[in-house]
Image: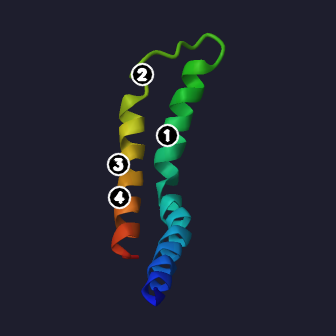
Amino acid sequence: MSGNGAVWGRVRGRLRAFPGRLAACGAEAAAYGRCVQASTAPGGRLAKDLCAPEFEALRRCFAAAAKKTLRGGL
């Protein structure tokens, strides 16, 4: 099963690259965080889907980062 080591080596490489890819989503994460923080501050009111546009932008960024990692692209 020597081929198994090569597979795990590729998997480990992808997992190591993933945090760096997610770092590119900083603007989206900050926008979502600001929205949630503003709606939970004193006087704010957190409601379902209040931050949906910001969350969707963050989700799309994460999905793109994951796709790049799975393809092994930079």
> Element type at marker 3?
helix
> Element type at marker 1?
helix
Task: For marks 3 and 1, give the CA distance.
Answer: 14 Å
Q: Please state the horizontal and vertical placement of residue 6, each as a whole percent of the image.
A: 46, 85
Q: Which mark is residue 50?
A: 2
Q: Please state the horizontal and vertical placement of residue 8, each as a whole percent of the image.
A: 49, 77
Task: For marks 4 and 1, give the CA distance.
Answer: 18 Å
> Element type at marker 2?
loop
Counting residues from the start of the chain, the first of labels 2 and 3 encountered is 2
Comparing labels 4 and 1, the label whose residue is closer to the camera: 4
Counting residues from the start of the chain, the first of labels 1 and 2 encountered is 1
Count residues near mark 2 (Cα–Cα under 10 Å), then give few for <14, some for 14-19, many for 20+.
few
User: In which quadrant of the rendered view does residue 30 lie?
Assistant: top right
Find disc 1 in the rendering and name its residue.
Answer: 31
Instruction: Check disc 3 and give the amino acid type.
Output: Arg
Q: Residue at x 36, y 33 (%)?
A: 53
Q: Please state the horizontal and vertical placement of residue 61, each as a whole percent of the image.
A: 39, 52
Find disc 3 in the rendering and name its residue.
Answer: 60
Task: For marks 1 and 2, give the CA distance.
Answer: 13 Å
Q: Residue at x 54, y 28 (%)?
A: 36
In which quadrant will I find the C terminus?
Answer: bottom left
Counting residues from the start of the chain, the first of labels 4 and 1 encountered is 1
Name the residue at the bottom extreme: 2
